[in-house]
Image: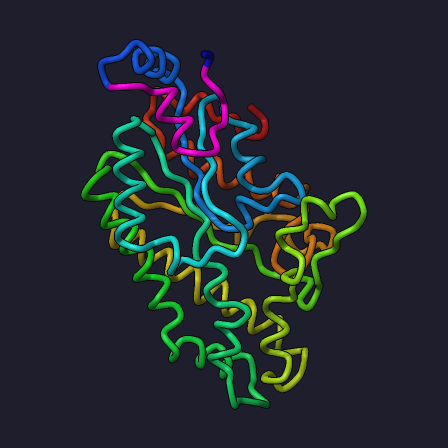
């Protein structure tokens, strides 16, 4: 059976790779001698079914093999348990993958988690609201989850780089996800959870809506981006693409809803993500990653 470009479960990968000494493994290794095998693991930025997401755009520009793991709404706390991260690290190492690309942590500071932080609060300025999130330990929790992931990778797949990403500054705060007759079937798993995930829990807490954008910027730029910088400082295997300064992200047309870019927007971000992926891959496999202009 010929190798697939994209696998959606471990059973398919296990069948394709066979045992270490098998003919299947030889074919796998020969195909990947100058091409990467990349695992994409994440929440909705990698797995939304509505349109071509960040995962899709990233791998569309890479000649190799991938496995797609995760689901919309996934929390870092659910993904980065010791047992699951060790399981994945062991599978990735035993099947000779080259890189793990993750989209983890954005949901942990939204929706019900944020509402819990703000319970009983009102009339807050952006800086004060952000401090409430810091004091509640949200970012420390996300850092601990990444630390668990990296500890498993360091122990079981020490040769394998891990690449993450920050988030682009939000523009359409309060916007719900749109579903129509064309995407209703795909959206079925999301019905009842189409946002807004940020504005809803903070609308009765902030002094006014003018504080929403500064609060969101603090949440993503000073909060989440700082978490990834700390993870990178603590773990040499980890690097990340920084979307804070990517051009075009401030146009409303870039955004599908409050926290998800459009298909075009994800395509823009994929170019920056693939720069980080290319830099992290073994030198012999970097040419398989196509960047704009190449």
Q: Nearer the viewer, residue 1 or 73?
A: 1
Task: Tell me where residue 58 appears, x and y as whole percent.
Answer: 53, 35
Q: Is residue 6 magenta?
A: yes
- Horizontal placement of 201 versus 74: left or right? right
Question: Where 232 falls versus 4 (above or below)?
Answer: below
Task: Tell me where residue 51 appears, x and y as whole percent.
Answer: 66, 41
Q: Determine which quarter of the picture holds residue 36.
A: top left
Q: Nearer the viewer, residue 70 or 274?
A: 70
Q: What residue is rendered at 81% in x and 47% in y? A: 181
Give the residue at the far right of this rendering.
Answer: 181
Task: Tell me where residue 39 appears, x and y as whole percent.
Answer: 41, 35
Question: Where are the magenta residues, as a range?
Answer: 3-19
Q: Which quarter shows the C terminus?
A: top right
- Colour scheme: rainbow
Q: Is residue 93 magenta?
A: no
Q: What residue is rendered at 45% in x and 81% in y? A: 132
């Amino acid at each position: 059976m010929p190798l697939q470009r994209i696998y959606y479960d471990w059973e398919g990968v296990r069948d394709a790779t066979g045992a270490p000494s098998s003919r299947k493994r030889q074919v796998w290794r020969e195909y990947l001698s100058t091409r990467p095998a990349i695992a994409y693991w994440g929440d909705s930025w990698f797995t939304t079914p509505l349109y071509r997401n960040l995962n899709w755009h990233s791998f569309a520009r890479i000649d190799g093999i991938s496995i797609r793991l995760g689901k919309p709404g996934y929390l870092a706390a659910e993904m980065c348990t010791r047992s699951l991260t060790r399981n994945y690290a062991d599978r990735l190492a035993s099947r000779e993958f080259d890189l793990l690309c993750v989209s983890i942590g954005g949901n942990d500071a939204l929706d019900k988690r944020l509402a819990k932080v703000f319970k009983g609060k009102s009339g807050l300025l952006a800086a004060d609201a952000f401090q409430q999130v810091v004091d509640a330990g949200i970012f420390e929790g996300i850092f601990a989850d990444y630390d668990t992931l990296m500890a498993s990778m360091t122990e079981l797949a020490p040769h394998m780089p891990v690449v993450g990403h920050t988030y682009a500054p939000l523009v359409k705060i309060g916007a719900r996800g749109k579903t129509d007759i064309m995407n209703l079937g795909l959206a079925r798993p999301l019905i009842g959870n189409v946002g807004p995930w940020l504005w809803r829990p903070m609308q009765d807490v902030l002094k006014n809506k003018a504080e929403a954008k500064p609060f969101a910027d603090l949440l993503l730029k000073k909060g989440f981006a700082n978490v990834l910088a700390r993870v990178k400082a603590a773990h040499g295997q980890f690097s990340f693409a920084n979307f804070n300064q990517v051009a075009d992200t401030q146009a409303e047309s870039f955004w599908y809803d409050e926290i998800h870019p459009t298909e075009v927007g994800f395509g823009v971000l994929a170019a920056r993500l693939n720069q980080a992926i290319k830099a992290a891959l073994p030198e012999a496999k970097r040419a398989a990653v196509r960047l704009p202009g190449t």
